Image (tube, grey):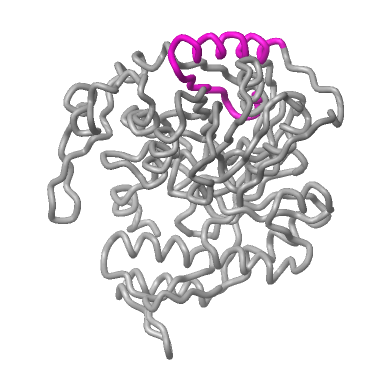
Amino acid sequence: MVSGFLFLLKKREMKFRDYQLEIINKGSSIIKTKGFLYLAMEVRTGKTLTSLGILNELNAEKVLFVTKKKAISSIEDDYALYNPSFNLTVINYESLHKLNQFQRFDGIVLDEAHGLGKFPKPSKRAKDIKNLLSFNKHPNVILMSGTPTPESYSQMYHQVYGLPSNPFGSHKNFYSFSKKYVNVTQKKLSSLVVNDYSGGKMEIIDLMQPYTINYSQKQAGFITKTTEEILRVPMDPYTKDVAKRLKKNLVVEGKSEVILADSSVKLMMKLHQIYSGTVKFESGKSMVLDYEKAKFIKNHFKNKKIAIFYKFREELNAIKHVFGDDVCVDLDCFNSTNKIIALQIVSGREGISLRNAEALVYYNIDFSATSYWQSRDRMTTKDRKYNKVYWVFSEKGIEDKIYKAVLKKKDYTLSHFKRDLLDL
């Protein structure tokens, strides 16, 4: 949904921190001389307000802020708090097509810009942003991310390829870019040998440095300590039996549905689902097999205001079934009531603040190291001294194996799974 609005009165006084004022001055200068800015500020250091401050300093009149859907309300709140002189339109990436083709902006903010970094071919999101930039005449552009290249330096190319002044502009596409800036290797994918373009060179970051402002939580004076605890839950014997049969036979047939794991990838995914009590059938339908995790969380965290991260859709259904009306799925509800909140890991790991949560509780764990490091930091604020994170793992399940990988900043891959399978 597109949200455009102009606040004429300040709701309350807002004061930038000293480091934000320094970044506003430096960022404004970079945009004037380089054409765009990459604001690489770690989570909770105030990227949103800082970006709005930069565009206000540049006397922008119409600003477009592109973000994730779940972050829209918090960005609107920051805008209302700051009350700059420009008009702001906030939109999520998936809704860019809803913009009026005649709308023009002299300021554009691309939030969580690392999401544009797919390679070797650009994602639809990256193409949409490139088209957006081509329709607007020399806008002041700010890209923002706490983790600009979380998995590979090669992710930078498609984040900036729509900007005329980007340092890689002489390369018409990623393949041309890769010949100079990527150590291309080969990897085996099933029976095929394909090029692996993840070996981006450090030179990519060096060339982006004149366009970039980096700022960490440590520099901002954050002293938050995050501790993690693993809680193990005995699953229903039926759930264990389904997992055991699937590992042995690669298929489990029911009266009307089939669980099929006819490849290593499908076996990894199916076991990941089953060990937390859900499954997606070969027909495309899915169901909850086991409510033990949801019941455990409700009993263990009774009367506590928690935020639950889940991975699979049916896990949310299990949470709703057990918690009933005591759970909500949007931030406004969570912040204004005593209810807990349930968020999908990937969609909830960026752009939102869970500062009102007493603890984060993970119903399941994602294969992505990026998901681990970003989502666990959602409660952090400059004044918060202590964060508590809980992982709810099934006894003898796959979650422990995944946790060990992402803790080392490594994605959990098929090679990990094949090595671990004998221990499951």
Residue at screen point 28% across, 61% down: 264
Residue at screen point 34% across, 64% down: 267
Residue at screen point 74% across, 56% down: 300
* Closer to us: 194 or 331: 331
Residue at screen point 51% across, 33% down: 110
Q: Residue furthest right?
A: 12
Query: Can you tell which quarter of the image residue 119 is in?
Result: top left
Tell me the quadrant of the picture where the C terminus can be found.
bottom left
* Closer to us: 201 or 135: 135
Q: Is residue 304 above or below residue 86?
A: below
**Residue 206: x percent and y percent?**
35, 14
Please say whether residue 167 is one of the residues in the magenta stretch: no
Q: Is residue 107 above or below residue 335?
A: above
Q: Which residues are magenta?
A: 18-46
**Quick check: 87 left or right of 190?**
right
Please say whether residue 34 is one of the residues in the magenta stretch: yes
Query: Can you tell which quarter of the image residue 186 is in?
Result: top left
**Residue 360: x percent and y percent?**
67, 45
Q: Is residue 168 above or below residue 230?
A: above
Q: Residue furthest front?
A: 102
Number of disc labels:
0
**Residue 132: x percent and y percent?**
44, 38
Query: Can you tell which quarter of the image residue 152 is in?
Result: top left
**Residue 245: x percent and y percent?**
37, 75
**Quick check: 41 left or right of 50?**
left
